[in-house]
Amino acid sequence: MKKIVYIFVALASVLSLSSCHKDLLDQVPTGELASSQFWKTTDDATYALNGCYTEVRRLFDRDYMFDGLGEYLRYRSSGTTSQSTGDRAIAYRSGTYSNPATATGSSYTNYYTYSYAGINRCNYVIQNVEGMLEGASDDVKTSLEGIIGEAKMMRAMIYFRLITMWGDVPYFDTIINTNDEVSDIARTPIADIYQHCYDDFTYAWEHCPDRPVAIGRQSKWGALAFRGKLQLYWACWNRTNWPWGKTLAPNGGWPELDTFTASQSESDAAYKAAAADFKKVIEESGLKLYMDGEPGECGDLGDWEHLPNYYYLFTPLANNSEELMVAFAHGGTGTNQGDELMRDFGTRATQGSQGWGQPRFGLIDRYQSTVTGDFCPPVTRLNPSSASDAYTRENSALNPETYRNRDYRMKSSVMWEGERMYCYLNLAFDKVRLYRYKTLTGTVKGYEAPNDAINADADAEGTIMRKFVINYAGVGRSDGDYNWPAMRLADVYLMYAEAANEAYGPTGDGGLAVDVVNRVRHRGNLPPLKAEKYTDKETFFYAIEQERIVELFAEGHRFWDLRRWRSIERVWCEPQTSGGVKLYDAWGALKNTYFNNTAFRTFQRYYIFQIPNSERNKNPNLTQNTPWL
């Protein structure tokens, strides 16, 4: 904890020298000025608030890395210095995201430390702006309370993430000026921090504007959605009757956290409260899905010119979309504030990108048929060196025809055998290239032009990303200007369905749960759910989980879902299971084996992170989570 003050001061110094684009939220509190000269006007308060956004953005805008700890995204890096420009990934740096079975939470000291730097920045704004309220006119007071609401919302978002990762953590809500103030602070019980987060989200809901006042700013509906999400997680943590996960949680709850006792009655109440918050957003906010949730065009197999609306939701074209309810802005080319989505997900053929994150081939089988609305038969994985008809056999993983009439979100998110994309080098259009597994350069035989191969040297399983990879010139691999969503309206729909299902059953609460799931499915051009998919709570849960997998793929949700659902053993295997889980590529070759005879303690560590030992060495009152003793 002693690092907090040093880092806060250092970051303030660094950021004060960076580019001053008010619309990009790259401002810092003017700490060098005496209070008598600053904190006089709403402009002063806004200037300081923008420093919060700069600080907090770094804690959420690379969340896709965490999906590497799930089963559908292969993330092959640990967030190293070489992977990022400047300090863009500094909070995520040194975390391990590449192996679900071993990356269990001991490498996240940076995330812990920079979270508290963000909290201190928020407290700096809240405390000083609260001091401006006395004597302010009604109009000015309303503006100042809105600024306080935005800062409180971000503070709550950080504490929410902290308790999700570590359980009990130290809590403070005042400015920390010296190391002595935090060098002996103890961990606050998770229930207390939950209440603080609830209160902060509530204040933001009551005082933030109906719509963001500038790009990347917070609104009341984003705050209410996050309050609903907080209560949904609280319901999951308190649940004692999961139908799975009996090995590690025989009574449900969160047994790895010694100070927490699950309460089913509290869980039931939290599901209802979460559903109420989400329902209010859905029915009263007036917010709409991007392009009204319509599927748009989906070109034929191999078409690169006609992509569904879902693809464009993850490009700057959607930056002003109401669906991006809580989003952190990036500056783009020349600002040193760009996103690195293309670098992290593109290939060498797209601005020399590095493809740190790529779909695991098993994701292919999760995309359902637009004809039946249900799963297709699992693809057959064939090695072309031993199967001469591997590229033509019916249902072969290498036969493009296998993927005809699939969920439009597949075309938008993933590239498979025979798909094409625009490619760029030196910020200019290069050519349209074709993806073929294990073919990195040259002309691909057997395909009509354009058939120059995509250099996808980071691909390891037979699919690459289309989602997040920009399809127009002029943007470097680290210079994107996409507003990264920390909360999307589609996620609100699916969280509502989950909470309402647990509180009232699939068709309770007016049947809205099934309706909103179908709205999300519609953007994939899928037919509505068949009645058999929501006959009971457990069946409908799996239908909701399916939509979360394909709708939120690579957005940083799957890992947290698996943990709050106590589902590690369900989707992988039970502890100490001989053989573990084997993952194969498109050719049927074994690529990874996870959780092979993995110890009970390793599974426990997946559910709760290690309090950084570097912090405990400085603070004798920081206890350690039991699985890490």
Image (cartoon, rainbow, N blue to C red):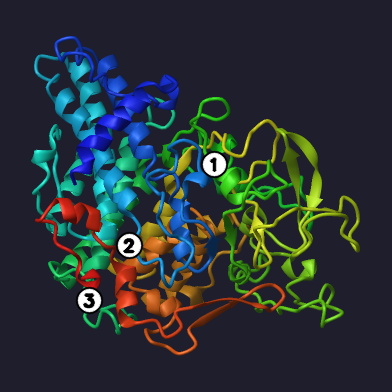
- Which residue matches tag 2? 106
Work out which quarter of the rendered image holds the C terminus and state it: bottom left
- Most extreme residue toward the bottom is 578
* Picture layout, residue 291 above or below residue 518: above
Type of residue at label 2? Ser
- Which residue matches tag 3? 240
Q: Check residue 340 in the rendering and tell me which mark sits there, or answer none.
A: 1
Q: Which of marks 3 and 2 precedes in the sequence?
A: 2
Between the C-alphas of marks 1 and 3, the distance is 41 Å
List x then y, in percent, for residue 412.
64, 53
* Picture layout, residue 259 above or below residue 169: below
Closer to us: 300 or 105: 105
Residue 231 can be seen in this image: no
Q: Which structural element holds mark 3?
A: loop
Number of other residues with Cα within 10 Å of mark 2, as a class: few under 14, some 14 to 19, many 20 or more? some
Q: Which of marks 1 and 2 precedes in the sequence?
A: 2
Taking the image as shown, residue 518 lies to the left or right of residue 381, namely left
